[in-house]
Amino acid sequence: METVFGVQSKKQSQSETKPSEFLRTQDSQSHINPVPDIISESKSKDVSMESSLTSELQSSPGSDEDERQHVCNSPCCSEISEPYQPNAASTLKKTTTKPGRSFSFSWFHEYPWLTLCTTRNKVFCFYCRLAYGKDSDLQKHPTSRQPEATFISEGFNNWKKSGDKFKKHDKSSYHRDALAKHKKHGNDSVTSLLLAKVTKEQQCRRNLLLVQLSCLLFLSRQGLALRGHIEEESNLFQLLKLRGSDIEGLPTWLSEKTYMSPAIVNEQLMLLGRAVRLKILERIKAARFFAVMADETRDISNKEQVVICIRWVDNDFSVHEDAIGLYVVPSTTSATLTEVLKDTLIRCDLPLSNCRGQGYDGASNFQGHVNGVAVQLQREEPRAVHVHCLAHCINLALQEATRACKPLRDALDITIEVNKLIKYSPNENTYSRIFKKLHPLRSVLTWMCLKLKELVAYDLCVQHVGHVETTAKDAQKGAEQELAYYDKLRSTDTFSEFYKSVVDEAEDKTDPPRLPRYRKRPKRLDDGSNTHTFPSVEDYYRQQYFEGLDIVSEQLKRRFSQKGFNTAVEIEQLLLSAANGRNFQISSHIRELYKDDVDFVRLNTQLSMLHDTVKSVSTERGCLIIEVTNIDTVVSVINSSPVIRHLFKEISTLLKIYLTIPVTTATSERTFSTLRRLKSYVRSTMTQERLNNVLLLHVHKTIADELSLVDVAREFISFNDRRRNYFGLFS
């Protein structure tokens, strides 16, 4: 039973302890009594006193509840650090009891441990209340006999027997224990003050460490340099100096420079970058399937850098492409690059068995049909479907068309030379004078080729193949629209309009159109037949026009017919056919490739139900879907309800695999742009580890903003005992 001040009475089983056992208990406890002069008192006297106290506490089972009703929250009991001993006569007069007796102020001098409670008008023992109150050390681990409840929890106001009671309590062993306990705390007061001071200093240092980490995170996130020619001129030091006017203790922190050395800053950067990388890898592992994308370039210090990106799809079917770091390679052979990719996946704890796609550029070390990186990885994991970057395909198609068509090639070469001349000219206002004196541009053919090139290149560039969300269907649809557009341009009427517009525009800029000078065929090539001649200038230009369009169309068809790309298109057509309620059939190629990922028996059933689900969901949303032409519609239907997502579990798995297959490697190219911003001419000596950490913080800004600096600081402090003693521990 717990009283108002926390004194616990003994259980009934303890009160029934035999006298001999009780004496043995008291004797064993007397060996650790801190007041030796009290031990010499008669054991029988203590035993009888203790027995009476025990019976007194056990005889009033309702006293605990009664005392709770008289809890004193006045300053006399709650806010004192020493005995409350008022000398006002009016206060002492309130202690008067029925016989007409009241508390005498002289008792305070005779018994300094007395403290008066003005709420209940009773006196207590100040030291016993502290020592034997609730949650006190002596209460949890008693070193003497059971204390008397009168001067601890109940209070004393029987002034008639005050003299005997006060003397008896003053000589009791538990009172001496309380005095010894209080004296011990008093001797440790200097130690307590020093400990409090150290704790306060550690808290201040932890706060300053968090400030330094926040500045470090800000500079890295923005891609700004950390160091300077000297440390005092570095961006980190100056930023901390700027914030020192608002943060107490920061100027002293800067003057000491205890934890601002380059090695410490690199370690803190490593912790920040690793926190970002672990967060990314945690999300990738939760998604299960992923695709690998890689590309290589040379940095400002002439080192061969390979960037590795991971494409993955979350549970809401949102596509993510995350760069996880740069890798310096001694060579760019396919064997070296393959080992680099496999080593990175092992370090990131990403099993190759979960890889469902690969995306690279057109380099032979990646695209080689025999020992390319894509082929070597597919030998170990056939489900890692490889797709040649479609953005590179478009670029290569234009390059091949320009290289194969001589008029287009010559026109672009001339344009490049003119651009260089004007760009590096000290006076750009001489553009018109230079342009008029350039004889090669004074040709309608050159002008027409420039217009044709502009027309073809512009329409290709408007395709959004560089977006992360671009799917195989989007890229295929864009290519089909482009080919249809070229077919439309390849007509006599369209050319006549185009030719007329070019001639009118170039009238004041070039010479009138004319046929090229006739050249006699060499005798070794002359077979006696008549040389072909164009009847008119327009016919000659029509042939050049059609040739350029045919070459571009042929290159697009060839570049977009890839085996891996066809696999993605096949999956999409299967889903769209099922969503529209048409007959569908799962090909043997898909069944064999993904037999370990998808249960095709259940998939076939779910595909049969998909059309009805699309109709019901569209009806609930108040819209009528006539035909599903985009995979995003299927995704929105499955995302409409957790029940539907669980019902179409196999379709969801197939959708994730489909969306995981990369279409472009634009993220790798953007990472190279970031590399050029971070590792510039003035920062060319940056180490590879520092570059990777800064790159992650700069590229993944959203994740960097979500970092817990307290967790980073806690990991930094726990590195060794010296830091733990200097900073303390975070709660």
Image: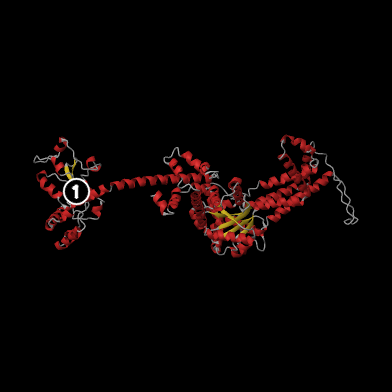
Q: Extreme left residue here?
A: 99
Q: Residue 41 appears at what percent x and percent y?
A: 13, 55
* Residue 103 in sight from this viewpoint: no
Instruction: Give the residue type at disc 1.
Output: Ile
Q: Residue 82 appears at what percent x and percent y?
A: 22, 43
The residue lying at 80 percent from left, 48 percent from top is 543
**Residue hosting label 1:** 152
The residue lying at 15 percent from left, 52 percent from top is 172
Tell me where residue 498 sits by quadrant. top right
> Compared to 17, does 153 lie above or below?
above
Query: Which one is nearer the viewer's eye here, 679 or 345?
Result: 679
Q: Residue 401 appears at what percent x and percent y?
A: 74, 51
* Residue 22 in sight from this viewpoint: yes
Query: Which one is nearer the viewer's eye here, 78 or 351?
Result: 78
How is the protein colored in the picture? Answer: secondary structure
Q: Residue 553 appears at what percent x and percent y?
A: 73, 52
Q: How many numbered dots are placed on residues in this image?
A: 1
User: Relative to 573, is 91 on the left or the right?
Assistant: left
Query: Which one is nearer the viewer's eye here, 683 or 164?
Result: 683
Q: Extreme right residue here?
A: 528
Q: For the residue carrying disc 1, how many other residues have a C-alpha within 10 Å: few (<14), some (14-19), or many (20+)? A: many
User: Relative to 160, is 267 on the left or the right?
Assistant: right
User: What secondary structure is found at the residue carrying circle 1?
Assistant: helix
